[in-house]
Image: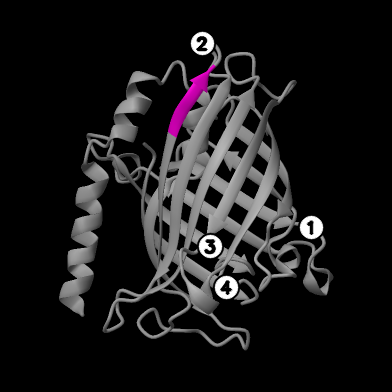
Amino acid sequence: MLRRFILLLVLTSFLAQLPSAQAQARTTASETSPMMERLILEEPSYFAIGAGTRKNGSVNSVLTDPNNQAKFRLALRLPILPLNERSDGFYFSFSEEALWNPFDGSAASLDNRYTPEFIGWWGVGDGAGWEVPSLGLSYTHQSNGLLGDNSRSWNRAMLRAAFGDHRRHPLLLTLSTWYPFAVDYRMPDLEEYVGQGTVLLLWQPLLAGRGWGVDILGLTLRSGVTVNRRLFTNLEATLLCDPGVFFDLPVRTTPHLMLQYFVGRGESILRYKSDTHSIRIGLAVLR
C-alpha cells in the first residue's frame, strides 16, 4: 500500500511537469485568449488526497473512508471559433472529475463526472472589468459514464457573468445560473442538492502587492432552492500556492500546492444526496 501511494505521488509530479498541448496553447496565445486563462484559474487540473466526516460527525481515516479518498480533475479547453483579437467567440471544454480510492485492494473509482461543454463568450479582453462584465452562454452535459442502474446524467443551459480582469484585478467574481433539462429520471430532485447557480470569488494576493506564498484563494458557493431550506448546497474553498515563493526557492515551479475544503451535498453525481465534509491536500497545474 505504501509503495502504491509513493508511486502515485511520483507519477502525479511527473505528469505535472510534462509540456502538454494545453500548456503550449496557453503560452502561445496568452495575449489573445484571456477567456481560456480565466477558465484555467477558475477550474485548474489537480490531484488531492484527504479525509472527511460522515453525517454523524465522526472523523474518518484517509485510509478507510471510501467516500473521502483521492479526488482529481483533468481539464481541456480549446477555441472553436474566435470572433476577434479579444478572444470573443466559441470554445469547447471537457473535464473529468473523479473520486478515487487508491488504497482499496482493487483501487476502485468511486464516482466520475465527465463534463463536455460548449461555451460562447462576449466582452472578453482589455475592456472587461468590474464596470461591464463579460457574458458567457453555454450548453453543458454531465454524466458518470456508467451503464445500467448506476448510470446518471443531466444537461443544463448556463448563463455566466464574469467581473474583473484576471491580469489586472486581484479580486474576480463570476456569477452563473442554469436551467436543467433532460435530467435522468432517477434524479428528479437533483436541483435541490446541486443548486441553481454558483458564486465564484477569486483573490490573487500577488496582484494586490501581497505575498504570503499564496497565488490564488478561491471560494465557490452553489446555492438555490435547496433541501431543508439551506442557504447553499455546498461550499468549496481552494488555496493554491507556488512552492517556489512559499519556501523562497530560486525558481518558480509548475505544479502548485493545493489545499481544498468541501462541505455540503452534490460532490458526487451518483451519491448526490450524501452530505460531505472533507479537507484535501495535493497538487494543481495552472496551465
| Residue 286 visible to the viewer | yes
For label 4, the SS is strand
**Label 2 – label 3 distance at C-alpha:** 37 Å
Specify the label residue 85 is tagged with.
2
User: Pointer 3: residues within 10 angstroms few (<14), some, or many (20+)?
Assistant: some
> In the image, residue 122 lies at what x, y percent?
65, 22
Residue type indicated by callout 4 = His
Residue type indicated by callout 1 = Gly
Circle count: 4
Q: Main secondary structure of the magenta part?
A: strand
For label 2, the SS is loop
> Which residues lie in the magenta part?
78-82
**Label 2 – label 1 distance at C-alpha:** 36 Å
Question: Which of the 4 image quadrants contains residue 108?
Answer: bottom left
Q: State yes or no: residue 71 in magenta.
A: no
Specify the label residue 277 is tagged with.
4
For marks 2 and 4, the one nearer the N-term is 2
For label 1, the SS is loop
Image point (61%, 29%), residue name: 120
Residue type indicated by callout 3 = Tyr
The residue indicated by pointer 1 is: 224
Q: Of 193 and 219, which appears nearest the observer?
A: 193
Q: In this picture, is 209 found above or below 60? A: above
